[in-house]
């Protein structure tokens, strides 16, 4: 019986000795960080993003979608909000107000309710009186969280939702960027 286990014992001892030598590796310096151009997310707090308010008329910067309801125009200003314009006299439209809705890109209207995206949320606004817009409802986290920049074949700093909502991307020198699109 002892003859059968003797080769096994020698093999076991050899593996233990080999493993001891294998763990004795000289220390090496870590690779220096790689710096390259890429994109870094710029965050806003959830509280800032979810603040919808009616302001005085603002200049139209990046016009998007337009919705006509009666004598009024509702003009999206991409990522900023919605301009309300009295168009009773199309020759001389009169700005009424601006609804600040950060992250707004799309709008739709049914009856007297205007629906708008507010970054990741959907908001419903009562527009029955265009001079007094009211927030009726908010459905949180309706839309996907922005996880990457709107560019392709680029490195970028990975998004961290705990820092807030990504409101834009800035070009930057990144060290060891882990994300790529």
Image: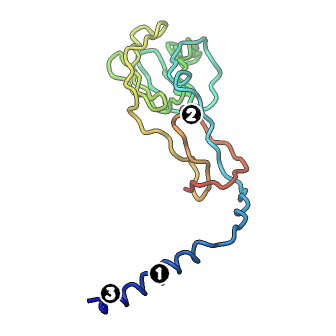
Reading the image, the residue beneath label 1 is: 15
Which SS class for mark 1?
helix
In this rendering, position of residue 72 left or right of residue 28: left
Q: Up-down: is 125 above or below 122?
A: above
Front-most of residues 24 and 86? 24
Which SS class for mark 2?
helix
Whole-percent x, y for residue 45 in the image = 56, 26
The C terminus lies in quadrant = bottom right
Q: Nearer the viewer, mark 1 or mark 2?
A: 1
Q: How far apart are marks 3 and 1 (CA)?
A: 15 Å
Reading the image, the residue beneath label 2 is: 163
Q: Residue 26 occupies which quadrant of the picture?
A: bottom right
Residue 5 shows which numbered tag? 3
Front-most of residues 91 and 24? 24
Q: Tally the marks.
A: 3
Circle 3 packing at 10 Å, graded few (<14), some (14-19), many (20+), is few
Q: Nearer the viewer, mark 3 or mark 1?
A: 3
Whole-percent x, y for residue 50 in the image = 50, 22
Circle 1 packing at 10 Å, graded few (<14), some (14-19), many (20+), is few
Residue at 63% of width from left, 18% of height from top?
58
Q: Up-down: is 110 above or below 167?
A: above
Whole-percent x, y for residue 30 in the image = 70, 62
Circle 2 packing at 10 Å, graded few (<14), some (14-19), many (20+), is few
Q: Which of marks 3 and 2 is nearer the N terminus?
A: 3
Q: How far apart are marks 3 and 2 (CA)?
A: 61 Å
Q: Earlier in the sequence, mark 1 or mark 2?
A: 1
Q: Nearer the viewer, mark 3 or mark 2?
A: 3
Residue at 39% of width from left, 10% of height from top?
128
Whole-percent x, y for residue 132 in the image = 47, 7
Residue at 53% of width from left, 30% of height from top?
103
The N terminus lies in quadrant = bottom left
Residue at 54% of width from left, 33% of height from top?
165
């Amino acid at each position: 019986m002892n003859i059968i286990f003797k080769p096994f014992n020698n093999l076991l001892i050899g593996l233990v000795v080999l493993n001891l030598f294998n763990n004795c590796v000289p220390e090496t310096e870590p690779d220096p960080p790689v710096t390259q151009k890429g994109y870094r997310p710029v965050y806003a707090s959830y509280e800032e993003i979810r603040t919808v308010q009616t302001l005085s008329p603002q200049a139209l910067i990046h016009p998007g979608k337009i919705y006509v309801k009666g004598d009024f125009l509702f003009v999206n200003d991409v990522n900023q909000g919605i301009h309300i314009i009295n168009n009773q006299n199309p020759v001389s439209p009169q700005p009424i107000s601006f609804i600040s809705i950060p992250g707004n890109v799309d709008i739709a209207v049914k009856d007297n309710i205007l629906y708008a995206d507010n970054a990741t949320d959907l908001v419903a606004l009562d527009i029955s009186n265009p001079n007094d817009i009211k927030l009726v409802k908010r459905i949180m986290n309706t839309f996907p969280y922005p996880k990457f920049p709107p560019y392709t074949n680029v490195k970028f700093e990975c998004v961290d939702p705990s820092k807030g909502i990504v409101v834009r991307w800035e070009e930057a020198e990144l060290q060891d960027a882990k994300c790529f699109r």
